[in-house]
Amino acid sequence: MIRLENLTKIFRRNGKETLVADNMNAVFPTGSAVALLGRNGAGKSTLLRMIAGTITPSHGRIVSTGTISWPVGFAGSFHADLTGAQNVRFIARIYGVDTGELVDYVAEFAELGVHYHQPFGTYSSGMRSRLAMGTSMGIKFDTYLVDEVTSVGDAQFREKSQQVFADRMSQSGAIVVTHSMGMVRNMCSMGVVLDRGKLTFFDDLEQAIAYHELLMNVPHSRPMRAHGALRRMERQG
C-alpha cells in the first residue's frame, strides 16, 4: 500500500511557481498494477520520483508498506566515475541484497560485455538504460515504479525486458507511466489520471483511459468540460 497524505509539490524558477501536486490524498492498493495517465508535463514522472523518495515534497508525506523501487530504467543515480559493476555492487549494499548475485544477474541481463567493467560516464544512453533496467529487475520489490520501460534498448532487448517484468508483476504491484495504451492494457488493472495537480482514481481501467483521452482533447483553460464528462461516465457506470 502507498498512501499520499496532503501531498504538495511546487517548483519555483525565475520567480514563477509551477504546482505539480495540489494537496493530493490517495491510496495505491497493495499488489495492484495502476496506470498513471496524464498530459505531457502534468507531473507524472515527478510524482513517481516523490514516491521513490528521490524528490522531496513541498508539503505532506507519502506512507508505504513494503518495498518500492526507484523508477525502472532510470539511470540518474549511477556514479559516472564508477564502473557499471561497481555501481551495481553499491546499489546491492544499499538495498541489502546479495552483492555477487546482483552483479552476476546484471552482467547477464544487460549484455554490456567488457563495458560492464568500464566507467559509467563512458556509456552511451542505450548502455545506461540496459544497466539501469538490469539493476531494477535484479532486485525484487513489492511495488515497481515504471516510467516508459518499453523505450529501453532494441526490439530483442525490449522483449526480454518485458518478459522479465511480467514475471515480476505476477508477485508485485506497480505504478506505470507510459504513452502506450497497449502496454497499459497489458500490464494494468486500474488507472489514475493526473490533471492540474489532482488525481482521479478509476477501478475500471477503460474508464481511466477514456477520461485521459477526453482531457487530451480539452483546452487547458476549460477543465469543467472534462469534469462534467467524468460525472456522466460515473452515472453511466
Image: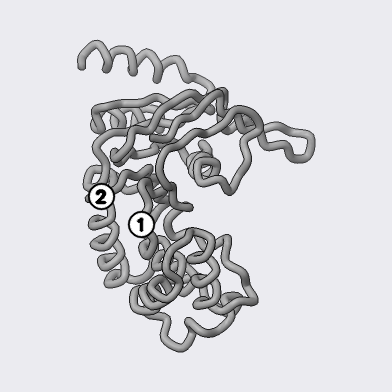
Image quarter of residue 17: top right
Where's residue 34, x and y in %? 33, 38
Q: As rendered, which of 163 and 172 lies closer to the eye?
A: 172
- 153 relative to 66, above or below: below
Where's residue 191, x and y in %? 32, 33
Q: As rendered, which of 53 and 233 lies closer to the eye?
A: 53
Seen at 40% across and 16% down, the residue is: 227
Left or right: 45 with respect to 155?
right
Q: As rendered, which of 53 and 192 lies closer to the eye?
A: 53
Where's residue 178, x and y in %? 37, 47
The quarter of the rendered structure image containing the N terminus is: top left
Secondary structure beneath disc 2?
loop
Seen at 61% across and 69% down, the residue is: 79
Seen at 55% across and 23% down, the residue is: 6
Where's residue 7, x and y in %? 56, 28
Going from the N terminus, do you reach mark 2 or mark 1 first?
1
- For the image, the number of numbered tags is 2
Residue bearing the label numbered 1: 140
The three-letter amino acid code for the residue at tag 1 is Lys
Residue bearing the label numbered 2: 171
The residue carrying pointer 2 sits among few (fewer than 14), some (14 to 19) or many (20 or more) residues within 10 Å by Cα, namely: few
Residue situated furthest right in the rendering: 15
The residue carrying pointer 1 sits among few (fewer than 14), some (14 to 19) or many (20 or more) residues within 10 Å by Cα, namely: some
Residue situated furthest bottom in the rendering: 114
The quarter of the rendered structure image containing the C terminus is: top left
The three-letter amino acid code for the residue at tag 2 is Gln
Q: Which mark is residue 61?
A: none
Seen at 57% across and 66% down, the residue is: 78
Secondary structure beneath disc 1?
loop
Contact, CB < 8 Å: mark 2 with mark 1? Answer: yes
